[in-house]
Image (cartoon, grey):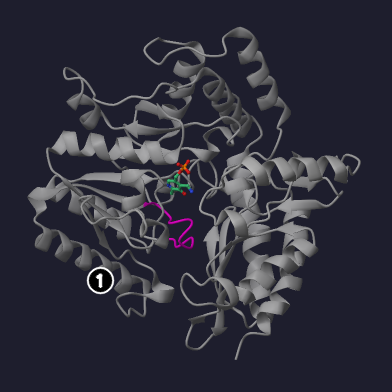
Amino acid sequence: MTPHPDPRAGAAVKAADRAHVFHSWSAQGLIDPLAVAGAEGSYFWDYDGNRYLDFTSGLVYTNIGYQHPKVVAAIQEQAGKLTTFAPAFAVEARSEAARLIAERTPGDLDKIFFTNGGAEAVENAIRMARLHTGRPKVLSTYRSYHGGTATAVNLTGDPRRWASDNGTSGVVHFWGPFLYRSPFYSETEQQECERALQHLEDTIAFEGPATIAAIILETIPGTAGIMTPPPGYLAGVREICDRYGIVFVLDEVMAGFGRTGAWFAADHFGVVPDLLTFAKGVNSGYVPLGGVAISGAVAATFENRPYPGGLTYSGHPLACAAAVATINVMAQEKVVEHAAHIGETVLGPGLRELAERHPSVGEVRGTGVFWALDLVKDRETREPLVPYNASGAANAPMAAFAAACKKNGLWPFVNMNRTHAVPPCNVTEAEAKEGLAALDVALSLADEHTV
Ligand code: PMP
């Protein structure tokens, strides 16, 4: 699986990258990207012969791992048949992908608007909600990430918003529930649920219900920390939306397509939004694809009135063929059930066992192949291992943790004071255990920074 090392080729790739590639979210002069030679399944490797178990699934999107032969073959077959065709035409790969997605999304989310990724899906969901209601404002949570384009980054709660937010976007942020670091000082899940819903009610009352087009939530917020909402919260938001005629948008760009051990995270809660955004896992990220699944009521708004939005590559045949093949692989190989099983039998118990032995682990949260370790200096006070949005020397404990993971063959997802265990949904039991063993070693370093 690992080809022969070829450091000279790696150096050439790196040199061209450093000279010409402008990287996302980075100070260009301060980064040192790894040159990747190849990838297969849950692993990738560099040109020096180092192999890494990918506990990040890329950017949480390779839900069936790298280079699944059936999906690669489907892309090749589609390329030979019809590589591209404009969105206004009915094309087999596109209509079949839409049918398979609509079949799996909850409730009557039966129409699919295709985009090239998650942020464009969010942009279009918000446009649909504003036109459907005729209202301007959108509510989103502080602990969220919704994408890097104009509206999506304004909706985003994390610091990536700060540089782009001029305060005129029509977005109003509020606090979602998060018992471990409760904004409402709750002590139980029930309190947290009730207080978070009351806070949302108050926010709506003071903003003016008739000005609010949509509430957008990640069903289980991902980048912000994998915080499963307390029982009753999403049903409560659904009820509030119904009462005020607000469009309920669930962003499942990260949580969708098997990640949580269900096709969609909303399935765990029995809640059906009016719009559901997806991307990433829909085709394991092999070709860029995202979209909005639209309810009958919202779709009806645009039955006799044009929808004023579109993208050149909407529903690109290569991306859609990859989605059809991915969804079929997930169904045939029971990947969603497997993700649930690995969460229940290996990752969940394994991470909790690590928490027992490592004082730096404040909380273990998650489900399926979607887990976070909240690292702390002090379990009693829950003070994070590094300050919010720390960089440089202040972030040294997390940087050392990440370096130790890599030295032990694990590529970790690290965000602020958290590490997320988010391997592909078809990660094997042995691979998951290998990842836990590497985390065990790296957590010993984090322990050195506890009180
Ligand atoms: N929404 C969520 C919940 C996400 O996690 C992301 C990406 N991490 C996005 C939207 C944006 O997706 P993209 O990067 O494909 O535009």
| Residue 315: % across, % down | 45, 22
Measured as percent of width and height from the top left, residue 294 is found at: 31, 32
Q: Is residue 274 visible?
A: no
Q: Nearer the viewer, residue 88 or 266?
A: 88
367, above or below 245, in the image? below
* Residue 245 left/right relative to 149: left
Task: Name the residue at 21% across, 20% down.
Answer: 306
Q: Is residue 78 above or below residue 383?
A: above
User: At label 1, which amino acid type do we have?
Assistant: Arg
Vertical comparison of 420 with 447: above or below: above
Can you give x and y, in whole percent of width and height, for residue 411 in the image?
70, 56
The residue located at (80%, 43%) in the rendering is: 10
* x then y, percent, for residue 310: 33, 24
Quadrant assignment for the N terminus: top right
Q: Residues within 10 Å of mark 1 (few under 14, many from 20)?
A: many
Q: Is residue 336 visible?
A: yes
Would residue 360 appear left or right of 365 to someone viewing this image? right
Q: Is residue 419 above or below residue 290?
A: below
Residue reaching furthest to the bottom: 451
- Label 1 secondary element: helix
Looking at the image, the residue that sits furthest to the right is 4
Residue bearing mark 1: 195
Q: How many marks?
A: 1
Main SS category, magenta section: loop
Q: Which residues are magenta?
A: 218-228
Residue in front for this viewpoint, 279 or 394: 394
Which one is in front, 51 or 434? 51
Residue in the image at 36% along x and 60% along y: 162
The verdict on residue 221 being magenta is yes
